[in-house]
Structure formats: C-alpha cells, structure tokens
Image (tube, helix red, strand yellow):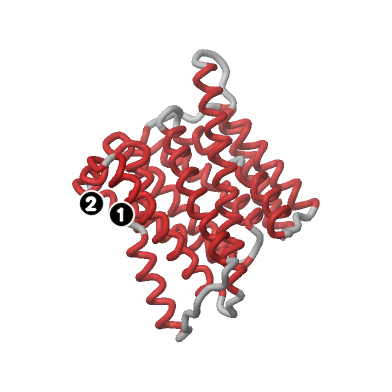
Amino acid sequence: MLWAVFTLIAAAAQTARNAMQRELTATLGTVGATHVRFLFGFPFALLFLAGVMVVTGAELTSPPSMFWPWVLVGAFTQIAATATMLSVMGQRSFVVAYAYIKTEPVHVALFGLIFLGDKVTPLSAAAILLATTGVSVISLKAGAGEARSTRSTIVGLFSGALFGLSAIGYRGAILSLHLPNFVVAATFTVTVGLVIQAAALSLYLALRDAKVLRAIARAWKPSLFAGFMGAFASEFWFLAFAITTAANVRTLALVEVLFAQGVTHFVFKQPTTTRESIGIVMVVIGVALLVWAY
C-alpha cells in the first residue's frame, strides 16, 4: 500500500499549494498564478532528481521516443487544467470548486483503459462511482445564481477531465522509460514535465504579457513556497503513478476534499452546508472501499 501513502502525502501538499495559488490569483491573474507552480517548482524538481541520482547511484540514459508524446500531453493538459481550476476557485467556494474538479477519477479510469490498458475491477469501479457521486453531491447548489453556477460546473468538469488526461500522460511517460527503479523514473518524469511547463509559459508570457512576469518576480516570496509545494506534491503523485493505476491514485486523492474543507473553515472562513457534508461522507466511504478493494 505504498502508493496510498504517497497519494495521501501528495494530496495534503497539493491542497496547501492550491490555497496559495488561489490567493496569488488576485494579484497575478489566472495565468500568472498558474505559472508560479511551474516556474518556481522546476528548480526544486532538479534538486530532487539530483538527490535521487546520488542516493541510488543510477545513471540517466536518453529516454525512448515514446516518452516525449506522453510527457508533452501530461505537461500541457496540466497547464490548462490548473488554469481552469483557478478560474473556478475564483467563482465558487474553495471546497465546492474542488467538488467540480474531483470528478477526475471517472475520466482517469476511462482514459487509462483506452490509452494504457489499465484495468478497473468491479469493486474499484463501484468505489470510483461512489466517491465521484459524493463530489457531485457537494457541487449541487440550488437557488440564486444558478446560471453562474452552471458555468462554473462546466468549467470545473472540463478541468477535471484535463487533470485526468494529464495523469494518464504522465503515467504513460513513466512506464515508457522501463527503468528498474520506479523512484528514478518518476522523479525524472516530474523534472522534465516541470521544465517543459516553465519554459512554455515563460515564453508565452514574455511574448503576450510581460508585466505578469514582472509581477511574479515581485511576488517571489509566496511564489517560492507555492513552487516548492507544487514540486513536492508532484513528486509523490508520480511515485504513486509508477506503482499503481492512475484511477486508483486519483480516486484516493479525493481525500483532498476533506483537506479543502479544513482550509475552507480555518483559512477562508466559508461554511460547509449539510448537502456538502453528505457528499463528503460519500467520498470517504468510496475511498475506503477503494483501499479495501486494492
């Protein structure tokens, strides 16, 4: 169950990083806040990779040609997913935004079966559906602002699909390396992905909106910690992807909703409704069923 430990660590770190990015959106905008995790994350990923190489004594070789399509899909869909996630968070409460996005496991299970041949057992499928239904219940909102809520739902669901495709791309990249040490494979993939993302977004902003890069430079202190948490979370996500299917990892990751609830209460002072609480209970039961099925 090492993958479960890695996933829980990653989920906790990602929740903290998302909260930081949400705050940075107000000053840097959606694209700027998205770029923070990549620009300030890749130097830490390089340090992680150097440490892994020293400890394991492994030597890196040129990755196979199939590595590059997988890692590019993972990198660019993650950029789009992060941007749409921050957009949703700017419109709805922190925990409800998570609810939209965390329909991801259904997308991951489908994409994993189609592109990687990752099988999902009937019991695991039931766990995925129960947990995903839980986040859907959390996202329901009646009353005023329904049109705005509908738009947020569509963007959030699209973000979840992009995160799902990103997870499959990165797992495909890790598996394509065929390295005997899964830690080396995962860490190398994290590093390459973050370098690609940092370079691509830096070039985009330099050409289209250089003032955002200057704003990021001025906000380097909070951005630095957000970047570290992003690289730290990514390292453990990828370690989990190297061990088990992305569907298992991303379903267990729904515990982020619980972490998000804590952030909501203690940081953003936003209440959690009875409906959201019922959905959270469903998520917990679904996650427990997944771990038991595994």
Circle 2 sits in a helix, a strand or a loop, which is it?
helix
- Asked if residue 65 is positioned above or below residue 41 in the image, the reply reads below
Name the residue nearer the viewer: 225 or 270. Answer: 225
Which residue is farthest left? 218
The amino acid marked with disc number 2 is Lys
Q: Which residue is mark 2?
A: 221
Along the line of sight, the residue nearer the viewer: 65 or 250: 65
Residue 9, image x, y percentages: 49, 59
Looking at the picture, how far across and down is residue 75, in whole percent? 48, 54
Location of residue 153 with respect to 69 vertically, above or below:
above
In the image, taking residue 155 as reference, residue 226 lies left or right, namely left
Q: CA distance from mark 1 to mark 2?
A: 7 Å
SS of the residue at dot 1?
Answer: helix
Number of labels in the image equals: 2
**Residue drawn at (35%, 46%) of the image:** 204
| Quarter of the image with the C terminus in it | bottom right
Question: Residue at point 47% right, 39% down?
Answer: 85
Q: Residue furthest top?
A: 144
Quadrant where the image shows the N terminus: bottom right
Q: Is residue 97 visible?
A: yes
- Report crowding for label 2: few under 14, some 14 to 19, many 20 or more residues within 10 A (C-alpha): few
Tell me the residue that label 1 is attached to: 225
**Is there CB contact under 8 Å for labels 1 and 2?**
yes
Q: x%, y% of residue 253?
A: 56, 51
For this orientation, the residue located farthest to the bottom is: 57
Nearer the observer, 176 or 143: 176
Whether residue 2 is visible here, answered yes or no, is no
> Which quadrant would residue 55 be assigned to in this image?
bottom left
The residue at 39%/61% (across/down) is 195
Q: Residue lying furthest front in this view? A: 207
Disc 1 residue type?
Phe
Q: Is residue 121 left or right of residue 212?
A: right
